[in-house]
Image (cartoon, grey):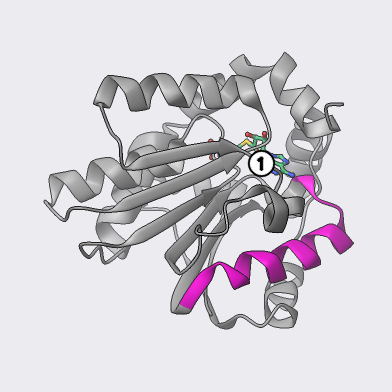
Amino acid sequence: MKTDAEKFYTERKQLLRFTIDALNYLPALRELWRKNLEFHPKMKILDVGCGTGALTKTLYEVSRQIQVTPIKFCAFDLTQTLLNEFQRWIVKKNQADVNIIKADVRKIEDEAPIYWRNFDLVCSSGVLGYLEERELKTALWKIRTRIKDGGRLIVMESREHWLNRILIQKLYKANLYGKEKFADMLHQAGFRNIRYWQFPKLYSYLNLWGYIAVAEK
Ligand SMILES: C[S@@+](CC[C@H](N)C(=O)[O-])C[C@H]1O[C@@H](n2cnc3c(N)ncnc32)[C@H](O)[C@@H]1O
């Protein structure tokens, strides 16, 4: 049986595409990675709740541009129809080093392959709000086990304010975990050195939508 989030995105996959295009999300992410992230060869990256692949695709493109290869990408999502769209991109790029599967972050220990571990970077955008608070706390623990010592977690989530209460809670049916509350949960899950990045200047309107939390294992 489909969960609520899976049903939501199966019925409204155009909504995600529309939002990504309208917000210029892909160019913003490319610029964000270029400015902030150090890539290195043989890096392993996991995209949690990848949807149509916004994070992985932009990480892949930037790593190619700056000629840091090979990088191994793994990604999973709950919604098959979004994964199908992502898969078409992978086939078009003929990119064997991008592996995607259907899995639920709440059951990552059973549904993600056992060898999906020791990631240098685990990233996620607009996903964790679909979990209830208790599920989120547990999921952060489980995600942490897949990161290598000294590796990083980067999470983009919606801020808690009146506009997001309409857009994110009502329209997107997700919970809002404010910056401080989320930092607290990261601490409780054993992450350290928590800090925040900003979306690049040209795309600073995205900072009104969300925060980018960066934490270390
Ligand atoms: C707003 S979309 C974001 C997709 C993508 N990360 C992006 O930035 O374009 C939210 C995504 O979370 C996924 N999702 C929701 N609950 C999930 C869960 N429990 N496990 C895995 N993915 C989940 C949905 O299927 C959807 O693809």
Write the residue at 57% across / 52% down.
113
The percent position of residue 79, horizontal first and vertical second, equals 67, 28
The type of residue carrying mark 1 is: Ala
The segment highlighted magenta reads 130-148
Splitting the image into four quadrants, where does ligand 1 fall?
A: top right
**Where is residue 91 drawn, in percent x and y?**
33, 22
Q: Is residue 118 left or right of residue 126?
A: left
Would you place residue 108 above or below residue 179 in this image? above
* Above or below 120: residue 22: above
Residue 68 lies, with reference to residue 23, above or below; the image says below
Q: Residue at x 53, y 80 (%)?
A: 217
Q: Secondary structure at mark 1?
A: loop
116 relative to 133 in the view: left or right: left
Q: Magenta includes 141? A: yes
- The image position of residue 6, as x and y in percent, is 75, 29
**Does 78 lie within the magenta span?**
no
Q: In the image, what residue occupies the spot 35% across and 27% down?
A: 90
Mark 1 CB within 8 Å of ligand 1: yes
Q: Is residue 205 something that shows in the picture?
A: no
Asked whether residue 75 appears in the rendered view, the answer is: yes
- Return the residue at label 1: 103
